[in-house]
Image: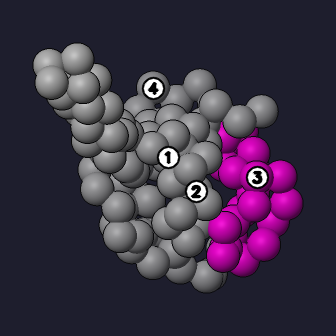
Amino acid sequence: MKKVLIPLLAIGGFVAMQSAVAATGEELFKSKGCAACHSIDTKLVGPSYKDVAAKYAGQGDAVATLATSIKNGSQGKWGPIPMPPNQVTEEEAKTLAEWILSLK
């Protein structure tokens, strides 16, 4: 019985941890609706993420600034169309911001 129970518990623990593992920036981009207005390398309704990365390159507070815009929305940074607030956690906004800023 122990030989069966221990592997089953290990598998159960692994499956439970999968939901606790944070999503990558690209996974969040695809699952949070960002792609409705943004593309990685082409302007759609909003700027391309490569353009965003270029604009914030070298700024020490870029991750925090971008994460705040992602979570709370913004207006006037890229033209007259406002970006609405997004349904993301602080950690998800930070993960997205770090991923966007890593694009070249």
Q: Nearer the viewer, mark 2 or mark 4?
A: 2
Q: Nearer the viewer, mark 4 or mark 1?
A: 1
Which residue is under mark 3?
40
- Picture disc at residue 29: 2
Give whichever of discs 4 and 3 has the lower sequence position: 3
Give whichever of discs 2 and 1 has the lower sequence position: 2
Helix, strand or loop at mark 2:
helix
- For label 4, the crowd category at 10 Å Cα-Cα, with few meaning under 14, some 14 to 19 and many 20 or more, is few
**Type of residue at label 1?**
Leu
Give whichever of discs 3 and 2 has the lower sequence position: 2
Residue 41, horizontal then vertical, whole percent: 83, 52
- Picture disc at residue 60: 4
User: Residue 89 falls in which quadrant of the image?
Assistant: bottom left
The stretch drawn in magenta includes residue 53: yes
Q: Nearer the viewer, residue 71 or 76?
A: 71
Q: Nearer the viewer, mark 4 or mark 3?
A: 3
